[in-house]
Image (cartoon, rainbow, N blue to C red):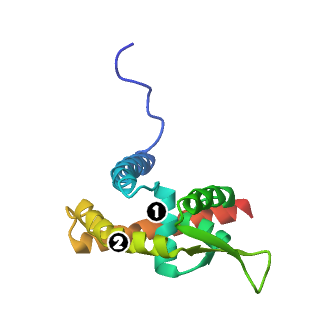
Amino acid sequence: MDGQGAPRDWGPEEDSALRLWIALARSYLTFSRVVGVRVVEYGLTIPQFGVMEALHHLGPLSLGELADKLLVTGGNITYVMDRLEDQGLVYRERSEEDRRVVKAHLTDQGREMIAGVFPGHARFIREMVSHLAPEEQAELRRLLKRLGKGMAEREALDAG
């Protein structure tokens, strides 16, 4: 073995795309790990915090809406809701308009808990991204949204 590795049989555009994917993956894993450590201090997992935050900011949501917002399966939302209910932070209620729909609500204890931790959490996230100027944060967000939408459109075309 000469230490050179496998020959590259792709061009500069593929190389650029691969490097972007690696940078995104590493950045996401690091961000997720750091935020996950912080969220554990609240006595929650990241999915539990996501449910609490969504209900705090958006009000009661159906389990399907929660799954869509948090990009998880319905089964995962059910499991997360079970754990949050066990802690007395949320409750489920069948919709009056459509009995097939189950809505998630914060309990008073849940509302108090998320309202107490969210401002500090927002400051923590601000600190985590503070090495980027506000304009850079906005540009990165814009680019990531554009990338995500483009990938979703391509996925829809490939599926259709």
Count all numbered tags in the image, as a single digit.
2
Residue 69 visible in the picture: no
Q: Residue at the right extreme?
A: 99
Q: Quadrant of the N terminus?
A: top left
Where does residue 63 sit, x and y in percent of width and height?
65, 69
Separation of residues labelled 1 and 2 (CA atoms):
13 Å
Residue 60 place in picture, x, y as percent: 58, 79
Q: Nearer the viewer, residue 38 or 2?
A: 38
Three-letter amino acid code at the position of disc 1: Phe
Q: Amino acid at mark 2?
A: Gly
Horizontal placement of 128 versus 7: left or right? left
| Label 1: element kind | helix
- According to the picture, the residue beneath numbered tag 2 turns out to be 116
- Determine the residue positioned at 38% across, 74% down: 115
Which image quarter holds the C terminus? bottom right
Residue 32, disc: none
Disc assigned to residue 49: 1
Does 1 sit left or right of 153 as displayed? left
Q: Nearer the viewer, mark 1 or mark 2?
A: 2
Residue farthest toward the bottom in the current orientation of the protein: 97
Q: Estimate how packed mark 2 is, as few (under 14), some (14 to 19) or many (20 or more) residues with alpha carbons within 10 Å.
A: few
Q: Is residue 66 left or right of residue 42?
A: right
**Mark 1 closeness class: few <14, some 14–19, many ≥20 residues within 10 Å:** many
Spot occupied by residue 39 in the image (x, y as percentages of width and height): 38, 56
Q: Nearer the viewer, residue 1 or 35?
A: 35
Residue at 31 percent of width and 69 percent of height? 122
Q: Earlier in the sequence, mark 1 or mark 2?
A: 1
Q: Position of residue 106 (x, y in %)?
A: 53, 74
Describe residue 26's horizontal placement relative to residue 83 as left or right: left
Q: Do residues under tags 1 and 2 come within 8 Å of each other at their CB atoms?
A: no
